[in-house]
Amino acid sequence: MTTTPILVVGGTGKVGRRVASQLAGLGRSVRAASRSSDIRFDWNDQTTWDSALAGTSGVFIMPNDADDGGQLRAFTERARDAGVQRLVLLSAREYVEMGFTAAITREDIVRESGLDWTVLRPVWFAQNFSEEPFLSVGVDDGTVSISTGAGRHPFIDAEDIAAVAVAALTKDGHVGQIYELTGPRAITVGEAVEAISTASGRSIRFAPTPPDEYAEYLVSRGLYDKETALVVASLAEYIRDGHDEHLSDGVQRALGRQPREFADYVATTVASGTWTTP
Ligand SMILES: NC(=O)c1ccc[n+]([C@@H]2O[C@H](COP(=O)([O-])OP(=O)(O)OC[C@H]3O[C@@H](n4cnc5c(N)ncnc54)[C@H](OP(=O)(O)O)[C@@H]3O)[C@@H](O)[C@H]2O)c1
């Protein structure tokens, strides 16, 4: 396992590129793949799969959220045929708790693949405030509009998700584990925005959006199509109603340490220059 490459699907994304970077930092051979990467991988084009998989020992799977399971089942079969031993699937705690059938099916496919598997179920990433438009455009504009109200959420740092993925891909003891991943405390979006505003020195405010207007807001800002906007709005409602504030111990179980604080994420992002005054 030490010299053979590990395939990172979605290797340019928020989690995937951190997985690739942390693996490389350990001296591991990494094959970061996506539609725009040198190593091209497209969920919707099966002709790109075999060359990405060839010779790899493990795969980090950022799935296609639009896949009801057909793509992933075919992919795990190709992975097995290619000699892959280990799969780590990026899932989501909310999707499972809210009963999203496709996400549950995708987990089942990986668990029943016959390969060693680990499932990661993170909550919303802290990095959504800097790298995911439904929150980052509001931070950039100075007004973060969302319908989460006074609901609290334990945002997880994508660096921690990647660290758990890397442990599962490279170390023993994680096979057959489902890790629910949260940060160390639940905060409101308003508190998160205040922390970013204070640390960056920029004036940014939280603008609570009525729940029945949020999906329309996301569409009108050009952030999502109607169908995806309705899903995001349902997740925001889940947070607003307080269903998503409980902490999970996946980081502690997998890494033997506490997850990073939201304030650490904010400090790192300010230091990177991401939120410099426009
Ligand atoms: N954001 C959250 O708070 C959150 C919370 C829990 C779970 N999740 C889950 O995390 C996953 C997203 O991970 P992320 O946020 O790290 O990704 P991301 O930042 O949205 O980036 C998406 C990655 O996937 C690649 N990609 C997009 N379409 C593709 C396709 N058809 N075939 C192959 N690669 C494709 C992109 O690169 P190219 O454009 O070059 O292809 C990029 O590398 C989703 O499954 C989401 O449900 C997100």
Image (cartoon, rainbow, N blue to C red):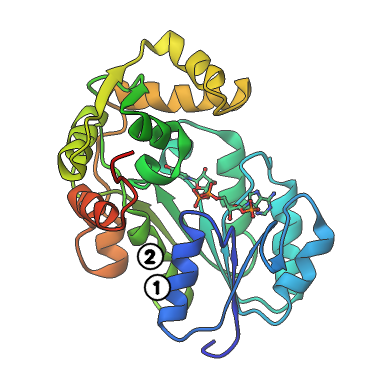
Task: Return the x and y of residue 25 as percentages of the image width and height.
Answer: 41, 80
Where the C terminus falls, by quadrant?
A: top left
What x and y, as percent, mark residue 162? 41, 63
Whether residue 176 appears in this view of the structure is: no
Q: Residue furthest front?
A: 278
Q: In this view, does 124 lie above or below 49?
A: above
Q: Name the residue under label 2.
A: 164
Amino acid type at circle 1 is Ala
Q: For the point 59% across and 35% down, which residue is it? A: 101
Q: Residues within 10 Å of mark 1 (few under 14, many from 20)?
A: some
Residue 161 visible to the viewer? yes
Q: Is mark 1 on a helix, strand or loop?
A: helix
Asked if the residues shown at circle 1 and circle 2 are in contact, with their CB atoms under 8 angstroms apart, the answer is: yes
Q: In the shown orientation, is residue 154 left or right of residue 26?
A: left
Residue 87 lies, in percent from the top left, at: 57, 67
Residue 11 relative to residue 162: left or right? right
Residue 98 at what x, y percent from top left?
A: 45, 30
Amino acid, disc 2: Val
Quick one: quadrant of the N terminus? bottom right
- Compared with 70, 210 (above or below) is above
Q: How crowded is mark 2: few (under 14 residues within 10 Å), some or many (20 or more)?
A: many
Taking the view exactly as shown, the residue that stands out farthest to the bottom is 3
Where 218 falls versus 113 (above or below)? above
Find the distance from the CA under tag 1 to the CA under tag 2.
Answer: 5 Å
Q: Which of 40 and 160 is in front in this view?
A: 40
Please give the residue where the numbered disc 1 appears in the rendered image: 167
Q: What element carries label 2?
A: helix
